[in-house]
Amino acid sequence: MKTARSSILLLCLAIAPALLAQTAIKFNGSSTTHKMLLPYADAIASAHKAKIVFVPNGTGRGLEDLAAGRADVAMITGDLSYFAQLLNEAKAGTIDPAKARTFRLADLEKTAATAIVHPSNPVAKLTHAQLQGLFSGKITNWKEVGGPDLAVVPILPSPSDGVFGSFTVAIMKGVPFAATARKVTLATDLPKIVAQLPGAIAFLSIANAVGEVRKAAPEPQFIPPNYLVTLGEPAEPVKSLIADFQAQVK
């Protein structure tokens, strides 16, 4: 019996490191940030004997998950204070930005954002002022910016979308969106809607600007900031995982 117990103990001690090696570290949030991290995830996880689990469910949801303990790290695209305010307006006390620690990732051209228009619309470039005008309703017809004689139809995703939140802060700058703007739940649905409406315009990451639409590039180029966020100073192995991602995403 003693020999059997000793064997079980030895087996448990042998299994324990393997279980520790599979500790799941959850990164929830921005799909844009997720795409930045994904190429390096396997190598970084292996180096730290950790298991990285990505849940690209959007910036706002990622921060909610972090605050609720459902994620170890939130991936966000945009300004933390903007999204914290948005979440706290919806439910008071959701997240305290003063307790959050942010880790900036390098700006990459492949994470740049763009406006998209109907494929029949010849407009290929738009200044930030023109974008503000088109989305606010100040510019109501495409002919005002060199396009066809068509009414402008802004299409908006959820305010908690990371790229769109960045657009709201950096380009709209407090100017309200047009009352005629239409809304969709997911940013990934924007190309499908814009492709069906000749006067439509939307704003999203270049990575999601797919399908039968034309890109109308912002001038100057618009690259939203991307961050990894923790509540307070992260412990190991989270701290080292974040440091390695920062070193690689450059």
Image (tube, rainbow, N blue to C red):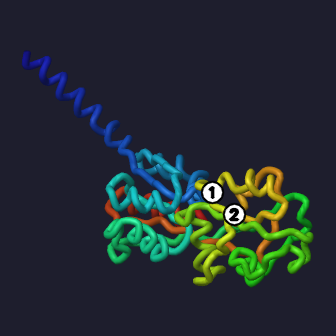
Q: What element carries label 2?
A: strand
Identify the amino acid type marked 1: Val
Q: In which quarter of the image is the N terminus?
A: top left
38 vs 20, nearest the viewer: 38
Q: In this view, does 15 lie to the left or right of 64?
A: left
Q: In this view, does 179 lie to the left or right of 134?
A: left
Identify the amino acid type marked 2: Ile
Q: In this view, does 4 lie above or below 80?
A: above
Q: In which quarter of the image is the C terminus?
A: bottom right
Which residue is outermost to the front?
180
Contact? badges 2 and 1 (CB < 8 Å): yes
The residue to which callout 2 is attached is 155
Which residue is outermost to the top?
1
120 vs 112, nearest the viewer: 120
Residue at the image point whose x is 66% and y is 80% from the top: 171
Q: Position of residue 77 (x, y in %)?
A: 56, 67
The residue to which callout 1 is attached is 184
99 vs 81, nearest the viewer: 81
Residue at the image point whose x is 75% and y is 66% from the top: 153
* Image quadrant where residue 194 sits: bottom right
Q: Is residue 205 above or below residue 13?
A: below
Residue at the image point whose x is 61% and y is 52% from the top: 39
Q: Is mark 1 on a helix, strand or loop?
A: loop
Res. 233 visible in picture: no
